[in-house]
Amino acid sequence: MDAIDFPDDLVQTQAAWNATYDALAAPRPRDTTALRHRLLRLSVRLWWHPYWKTAPSVPAARTELRQLVRAREAVRAA
């Protein structure tokens, strides 16, 4: 599959979703209610983003978005 050029706001939302999910997955997270609400809001923004109306294969594009953001996070962490 060719690399997809995702909108910046979609990439940023996925990165925020990942960070929130990771915060919830940490041992003894603080303020779990706020984190869960944030995760829900970010999930809605990801799911209903207008970009998905133009994607030829939405499931594949969603997977590629997650992989792209995780790869960028791994590079920043290294």
Image (cartoon, grey):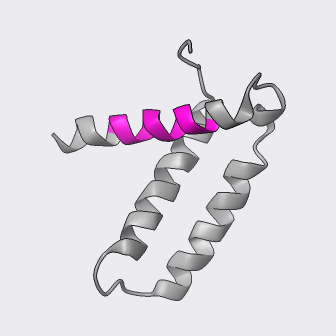
Q: Does 47 sit left or right of 68 as displayed?
A: right
Q: Quadrant of residue 67?
A: top left
Location of residue 73 in the rendering, given as x and y in whole percent from the top left corner: 32, 42
- Vertical comparison of 3 with 34: above or below: above
Location of residue 9 in the rendering, given as x and y in whole percent from the top left corner: 61, 39
Residue 16 included in the magenta stretch of the image: no
Judged from this view, the residue extending furthest toward the right is 53
The structure residue drawn at horizontal position 46% and vertical position 65%, both measured from the top left corner, is: 20
Q: Quadrant of residue 29?
A: bottom left
Q: Nearer the viewer, residue 57 or 74?
A: 57
- Vertical comparison of 30 with 15: above or below: below
On-image quarter of the C terminus: top left
Judged from this view, the residue extending furthest toward the left is 78
Q: Which residues are magenta?
A: 62-72
Name the magenta segment's main secondary structure. Answer: helix
Q: Does 34 sit left or right of 58 as displayed?
A: left
The structure residue drawn at horizontal position 52% and vertical position 57%, both measured from the top left corner, is: 17
